[in-house]
């Protein structure tokens, strides 16, 4: 019992750090011998607004129970996404899931979240402040959220790229100034040789 109490206490402590957003609620019916039985399906996005986000779906006979189930599932499925300066994406990216396709682009400070519906909920819960996004294809909220998370999972920070390639972050971020500076010298050398 003591262990269970500790777990409950931990859940209570964790809850305030996560924000959640109800994206869609759907009434579903099952036809049985005596008539129809109604239930509810909820789609919820949860995040800490500091680079972690997850989504979940829950079904129950009552709306609050469906939302609770969806929120619990979303907390279990959270993923960490690297953000540039904690406000935007590192690079432009595309995401796909089924017929859903989304395009997400990095944006300068002050742009805000330019995205619709389910995508906006994901970005707000993730903590992104500046992004331009467009959904192409399926308007199904489930597919849109999955496509958005698919795209965000491809997001790579310079640190991750440098680590993967065995280089320093400075080498990855270095601009292409060096080759441009060498080009006039090479041209001069060719003219002097001829």
Image (tube, rainbow, N blue to C red):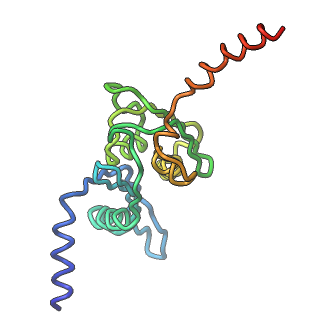
Residue located 21% across and 71% down the image: 11
Which residue appears farthest toward the front when viewing the image? Answer: 193
Is 91 displayed left or right of 56 in the figure? right
Of the pair 179 and 91, the residue shown nearer to us: 179
- Name the quadrant containing residue 186: top right
Residue at x-position 71% and y-position 10%:
188
Above or below for 53 versus 7: above
Asked whether, in this view, residue 25 is left or right of residue 144, the answer is: left
Image quadrant containing the C terminus: top right
Residue drawn at point x = 29 percent, y = 67 percent: 65
Residue 74 position (above or below residue 86): below
**Foreground residue among 191 and 11:** 191
Q: Is residue 47 above or below residue 113?
A: below
Quadrant the N terminus occupies:
bottom left
Whole-percent x and y of residue 95? 56, 45
Residue 37, how many percent across, how many down?
41, 69
Percent of width and height locating residue 6: 17, 81
Q: Residue furthest bottom?
A: 1
The image position of residue 76, as x and y in percent, is: 37, 68
User: Between 53 and 90, which is closer to the camera in this rendering?
Assistant: 90
């Amino acid at each position: 019992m003591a262990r269970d109490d500790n777990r409950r206490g931990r859940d209570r402590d964790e809850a305030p750090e996560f924000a959640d957003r109800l994206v869609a609620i759907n009434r579903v019916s099952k036809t049985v011998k005596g008539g129809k039985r109604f239930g509810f399906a909820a789609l919820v996005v949860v995040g800490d607004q500091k680079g972690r986000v997850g989504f979940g779906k829950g079904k129950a006979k009552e709306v609050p129970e469906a939302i609770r189930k969806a929120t619990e599932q979303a907390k279990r499925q959270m993923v960490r996404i690297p953000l540039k300066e904690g406000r935007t994406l590192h690079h432009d990216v595309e995401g796909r899931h089924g017929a859903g396709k989304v395009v997400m682009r990095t944006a300068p400070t002050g742009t805000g979240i330019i995205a619709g519906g389910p995508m906006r909920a994901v970005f707000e819960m993730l903590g992104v402040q500046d992004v331009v996004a467009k959904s192409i294809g399926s308007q199904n909220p489930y597919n849109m959220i999955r496509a958005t998370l698919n795209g965000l999972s491809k997001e790579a920070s310079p640190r991750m790229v440098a680590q993967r390639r065995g280089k320093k972050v400075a080498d990855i971020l270095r601009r292409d100034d060096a080759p441009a500076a060498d080009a006039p010298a090479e041209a001069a050398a060719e003219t002097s040789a001829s």
